[in-house]
């Protein structure tokens, strides 16, 4: 009888550790998703500062700056992941074209405030990309854990569902204006 | 897997501290007998010394090493790009944010230290910031972040601190015995010799610890950190370009020392180490470029 109890205890402990592991991974996924939004918000906050800083110099490129402001508004108001993906890509592209034009203005390239904003926006763009990368890494680990035997049994009992990857729609990437400027 | 690496590094650090303590107690026992205070008090003293040294190397190892090379905490306003790149690699690796230090040294190099990811420190020479562009710096930081992830930093730090202390003690004892011993000999008291012997014993032990460093920072470990660094940055070519640039400049370091040297990203060119601690650069570059071609 003691052997039976021992076996049950081992199985129960295994269930417990698997269950906890799934919960930890699921929380990390939520945290990673929140981190992406933190960086997106940071970018929205930085853009008006950039527009303000370069406005005085770039009198002839008004349209460019209006595009950025519009792209920012579109991205902030986007509904659903698909629409947001397109809007975010447009915003990145329009920002790149602004920095492309900055290269033509020696006064702008020497402006410390603009340089600082450029560095801030560069790192924010990178952080958005890297936090998406980490989000996908952690989703893969979670999905793998709940699909592999015997974890899949425990996942089924407690209702752990597969999480979606962050994906960039390749069609919209192709449509985005091609500006290559070592941002 | 990374988890095996973590466990291995913890076990190795634990046994190193145990071995080191046994050696210190044993040495103090003989010093006690030779100096006339007796073996028992010697053992007691040795236990006390080894306890302090172990605790120091575990809890303050990173700050001792950072102080020894004159590193200062990086001001985000003064080094925005460095701090940003570390933040980027932190997000990508999922590790906590390490402290960022800058060393006033023109030689392009970097190292990571600390007992675990929550107490990790990334120290970068000013020369590295001047030489590399953003992408290459990212490669180097990603490499160091994977040392943090694998807990290579724990073992490497403990070894470096113990080695540093042995170097200091052996210098102290050999010098002390040369000056103090001479006077005693004139008093016709032969007891000065034991200090010299301790110095010699420590001088012999230091290279053995050097061997342990080689195990700590073995070639396989560097290749592993290159590969997992490339996984963190998703850009092996950045690190390959950084390695090539650093190999081409050959600027000697003016802050490093024998104890810290093996921790660096690249072996400091002007520090003599008894054993080769770093793999050949050409091999590292070619492995990284192969990863890049697979991706491209």
Image: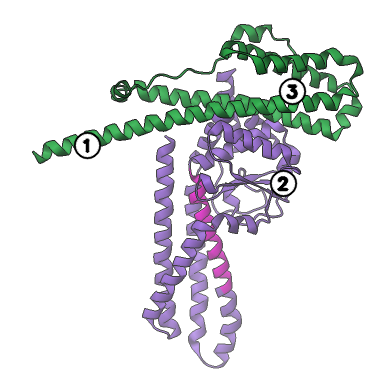
Chain colours: A green, B purple
Residue at left 28%, top 31%? A15
Residue B77 occupies which quadrant of the picture?
top right
State if disc 3 and disc 1 touch (CB < 8 Å).
Answer: no
- The quadrant the C terminus of chain B occupies is top right
Please name the residue that numbered disc 2 is placed on.
B75
Q: Residue beneath label 3, please?
A: A182
Q: CA distance from mark 1 to mark 3?
A: 56 Å
Q: Quadrant of the N terminus of chain B?
A: top left
Neighbourhood count class around disc 1 (C-alpha, 10 Å): few under 14, some 14–19, many 20 upward: few
Q: How many marks?
A: 3
Say which element carries label 2: loop
Residue that mark 1 sits on: A10
Image quadrant where residue B274 sits: bottom right
Above or below residue B192? Residue B278 is above
Q: Which mark is residue B16?
A: none
Find residue A48 and report its horizontal and vertical position in percent.
77, 25
Question: Residue at the location (60% across, 31% down)?
Answer: B285
For mark 2, does the 10 Å Cα neighbourhood hold few (<14), some (14 to 19), or many (20 or more) residues?
few
């Amino acid at each position: 009888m003691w052997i039976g109890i021992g076996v049950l205890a081992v199985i129960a402990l295994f269930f417990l550790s698997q269950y906890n592991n799934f919960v930890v991974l699921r929380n990390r996924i939520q945290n990673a998703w929140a981190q992406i939004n933190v960086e997106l918000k940071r970018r929205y906050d930085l853009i008006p500062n950039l527009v303000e800083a370069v406005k005085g110099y770039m009198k002839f490129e008004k349209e460019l700056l209006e595009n950025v402001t519009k792209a920012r508004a579109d991205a902030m108001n986007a509904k659903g992941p698909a629409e947001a993906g397109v809007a975010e890509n447009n915003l990145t592209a329009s920002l790149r074209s602004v920095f492309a034009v900055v290269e033509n203005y020696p006064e702008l390239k020497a402006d410390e405030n603009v340089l600082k904003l450029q560095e801030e926006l560069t790192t924010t763009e990178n952080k958005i990309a890297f936090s998406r990368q980490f989000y996908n890494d952690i989703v893969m680990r979670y999905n793998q854990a709940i699909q592999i035997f015997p974890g899949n049994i425990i996942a089924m009992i407690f209702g752990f569902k597969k999480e979606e990857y962050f994906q960039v729609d390749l069609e919209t990437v192709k449509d985005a204006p091609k500006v290559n400027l070592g941002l | 897997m990374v988890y095996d690496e973590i466990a291995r590094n913890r076990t190795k650090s634990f046994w190193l501290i145990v071995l080191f303590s046994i050696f210190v107690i044993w040495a103090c026992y003989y010093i006690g007998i030779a100096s006339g205070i007796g073996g028992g008090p010697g053992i007691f003293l040795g236990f006390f010394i080894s306890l302090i040294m172990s605790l120091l190397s575990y809890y303050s190892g990173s700050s001792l090493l950072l102080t020894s090379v004159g590193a200062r905490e990086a001001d985000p306003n003064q080094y925005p790009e460095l701090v940003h790149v570390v933040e980027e690699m932190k997000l990508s690796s999922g590790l906590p944010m390490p402290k960022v230090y800058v060393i006033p040294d023109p030689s392009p190099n970097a190292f990571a230290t600390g007992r675990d990811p929550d107490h990790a420190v990334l120290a970068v020479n000013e020369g590295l910031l001047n030489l590399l562009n953003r992408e290459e710096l990212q490669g180097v930081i990603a490499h160091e972040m994977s040392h943090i992830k694998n807990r290579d930093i724990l073992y490497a730090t403990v070894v470096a601190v113990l080695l540093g202390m042995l170097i200091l003690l052996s210098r102290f004892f050999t010098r002390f015995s040369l000056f103090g011993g001479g006077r005693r000999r004139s008093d016709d008291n032969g007891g000065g010799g034991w200090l010299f012997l301790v110095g010699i014993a420590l001088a012999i032990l230091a290279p053995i610890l050097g061997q342990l460093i080689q195990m700590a920072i073995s070639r396989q470990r560097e290749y592993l950190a290159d590969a997992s660094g490339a996984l963190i940055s998703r850009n092996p070519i950045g690190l390959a370009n950084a390695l090539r640039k650093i190999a081409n400049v050959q600027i000697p370091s003016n802050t490093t020392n024998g104890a810290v040297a093996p921790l660096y990203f690249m072996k400091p060119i002007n520090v003599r180490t008894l054993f080769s601690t770093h793999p050949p650069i050409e091999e590292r570059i070619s492995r990284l470029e192969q990863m890049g071609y697979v991706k491209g």
